[in-house]
Amino acid sequence: MALFRQSTQLGPLEARWMALIQGIAQGDQQALAPLYDETSRFVYALALRILQDYGLAEEATMDVYLQIWRQAHSYAPARGNPSAWLLNMARSRAIDLLRRKARKKRFEESLDAACSTVASTHDPEQASLLDEEQRRAREALAQLKPEQREVIEIAYFAGLSHSEIAELLGLPLGTIKTRIRSGMMKLRESLVSLKELDLAS
């Protein structure tokens, strides 16, 4: 019995890719290679557009097909055709790598800034205040809803505009603006509350 119900609206390529995904889900090791050969070009193109880095785009692409090998059974045709499923995974993996790259860069910049500050001031009290501010910022971010934190991190780390984030996530521009606005308001409230708690303790 077929794992996936064939759709009469699928074109020949989409139908072929669905059959290959079905084969992978059933453990057919030979089905992955033709799927990769026929679809990796547009998966890589999307990853490169998001990441703007050839090496990271290749890593994201490899991650997508590793995920397909492990989770082909999770493909649900009702949620979209095979190409949409592949592109959604590519976008998710690229954003994950973008966040990881941004966190690493932020950490390195913070470390450099901290070392520079300590070297220039030799003031343990000031260094301690900087540590407290960074801790409060991390805690405030953790209190945001996941969808708010996602758009704020992308805007801050990747430097994308609201319209670019909307295109990246496949969401309406108004939704992105609302999430950023509400997230920033919550972030400010959390920072104030955390600072007041620290002062009261």
Image: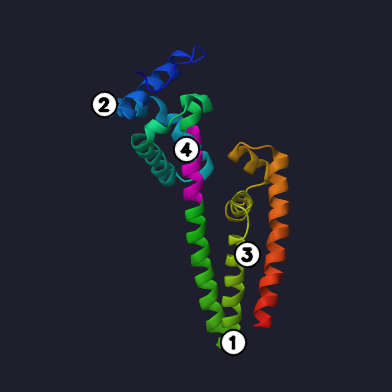
**Residue pointed to by mark 1:** 125
Q: Is residue 71 magenta?
A: no
Mark 3 / mark 2, whichever is N-terminal: 2
Q: Find residue 15 and report its horizontal and vertical position in percent.
A: 43, 17
Amino acid at circle 3:
Ala
Count the marks: how many? 4
Q: Are marks 1 and 2 in contact (CB under 8 Å)?
A: no
Three-letter amino acid code of the residue under disc 4: Ala
Q: CA distance from mark 4 to mark 1?
A: 46 Å
- Figure quadrant of residue 120: bottom right
Q: Which mark is residue 30?
A: 2
In the structure shown, which secondary structural element does the residue marked by tag 4 occupy?
helix
Measure the C-alpha gap from mark 1 to mark 3: 23 Å
Secondary structure at badge 3 equals helix
Residue 63 found in image quarter:
top left
Q: Please tell me which of labels 4 and 1 falls first in the chain.
A: 4
